[in-house]
Image (cartoon, rainbow, N blue to C red):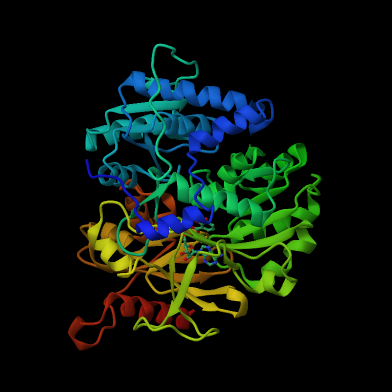
Amino acid sequence: MTPLRQDWPADLAQRYRDAGFWRGETFSDVLRARAAERPDATAIIDGERRWSYAELLARAEAAAAGYLAAGLRPGDRVVVQLPNIAEFFSAVFGLFRARMIPLYALPAHRITEVAHFARRGEAAGYVIPATHDGFDYRAQARALQAEVPAVRHVVVAAGDAAEFTPLATERDASVALPDDAAPSDVAFIQISGGSTGLSKLIPRTHDDYLYSCWASNDICGVTDSSVFLVALPAAHNFPMSSPGHIGALYAGATVVLSPAPAPDVAFPLIARHRVTITGLVPPLALLWMQAAPQTPHDLSSLDVLLVGGAKFTPEAARRVRPALGCTLQQVFGMAEGLVNYTRLDDDEETIVTTQGRPISAMDEVLVVDDAGAPVPDGTPGHLLARGPYTIRAYHNDAGANARAFTEDGFYRTGDIVKRLPGGYLEVQGRAGDHINRAGEKISAEEVEDHLLAHPNVFDAAIVSIPDEFLGERSCAFVIPQGAAPKPAALKAWMRARGIAAFKVPDQVVLVERFETTAAGKISRKELRARLRAGFLAEQ
Ligand code: J2J
């Protein structure tokens, strides 16, 4: 198996420890400590179910023993694809306790993506619900095992397990649990949005991730009396760590799970559980602001609304306080590490016009031109980052690592930003070719590769088109060959290839050719820019 590592140079690692940022804790340590300090406090609320910290710990240990009894081994990587249900937490903390490595897939991912994660991550297990939102994950598990036979173990965390292993809920006392991981070990694998090709795997350590979470708590005002609503998918890095459910559990607070982010689902939960803080992507924040004036539900407990994942316009940002009666906190983060927040006591102008400044005094941020030379403050440039919770490498991907990291270990975020006085950042856009569709990142290249597999597609280019609600939507320009496919049929064909629905182009435009110069020598990046410009000019 390809070793799973995330290494900082020894001198930097020591500085992060000396500064007290890396506390030498593991995820299991944190849960054990909270369960000891406040066993009866409510950790998780899911519908009518409430789990105390003691119960969450007991369930995590039961799950850990269950994985081992089923034949999984410490060090095994396990794809976890669970929606916002309480078992997300027992399943994942169970993996931590058994020293296994969760690899987080989103509920929207389909066989093509999950197979890629399992292959690239060399996964031995897959944890799923039986069904969710009308989709049968057991059927997907069968397809995955057929494609990637190394995935020998499927654990069903909720619902009818069929031929698979149900998630253990009672501790099998005959199974000994292994020693805990080391704090510098990789704890789990996140998935990158990525601009080029398939998603990359992001190994994060206990030390670095827990630091980003507790430091976020300080910045976002999370304490043991906070109530954090998980409105976005729990497996995504934003609702997990900024400050997220992990931040909330670190603080000994209560995590409320919303099965969906829509106002009619989330508002009653806010009122009922006196939710104090939550996070949304911009299109959802717009929906919430629209729905708030008419709602019969009492939203007055909400203190802080984090908005991030995509650019929130100043016009929309200005409306948050009047519409929802809470403080807006903009957050500009990435699963690879660096997270920026506006501070709760910043002046209103800073809160609405910037995407914040880094968490840590030890975050190193560079803004550079195309040649890599630093640009003056106020000038847009490429954002590079290095620090105590920003990765040094993707897993098992030498090509991506060569592109994404500088020689001295800075991560090239791919974002174009302006740095303002005080270190605040204003996001200007992306250097690469990804589409940020309501916070969901889509790689143009990945979707083009799917389209090119169609027998009647000669060439394809995916571009982002500005969208008032989604921020950006995707448009596929397609040159047909033979019988031109109908756009609707092409979309249905894409879906049938087993990819997340958000990657299927919102719009398909058939064209005869792409306007290129110099005998087709034009770069795809430039081609995409031309197509977008031409298309927008026509509208
Ligand atoms: C503009 N672009 C933004 C923002 C992210 C907190 C918040 C978000 C993420 C996330 C996260 C943006 N304005 N406020 O992991 O912990 C775009 C940038 C960035 C990419 C990362 C967190 N906030 N973005 O969105 O890994 O382009 O993480 O590089 O999904 O989202 O995407 P992702």
Residue at 38% in and 60% down: 11
Work out whether residue 352 can be spotted: yes
Rendered image quadrant of residue 468: bottom right
Task: Tell me: 52 left or right of 102.
Answer: right
Q: Nearer the viewer, residue 441 or 96?
A: 96
Task: Tell me: 143 left or right of 207.
Answer: left
Q: Nearer the viewer, residue 444 or 306?
A: 306
Residue at 70% in and 52% down: 221
Residue 74 lies, with reference to residue 259, above or below; the image says: above
Residue 454 lies, with reference to residue 459, above or below; the image says: above
Counting every numbered tag in the picture gives: 0
Considering the image in quadrants, where does the N terminus appear? top left
- Where is residue 238 drawn, in percent x and y? 53, 53
- Where is residue 107 drawn, in percent x and y? 45, 42
- Where is residue 87 drawn, in percent x and y? 52, 30
> Farthest residue toward the top?
174
Q: Nearer the viewer, residue 511 or 528?
A: 528
Residue at 47% in and 20% down: 62
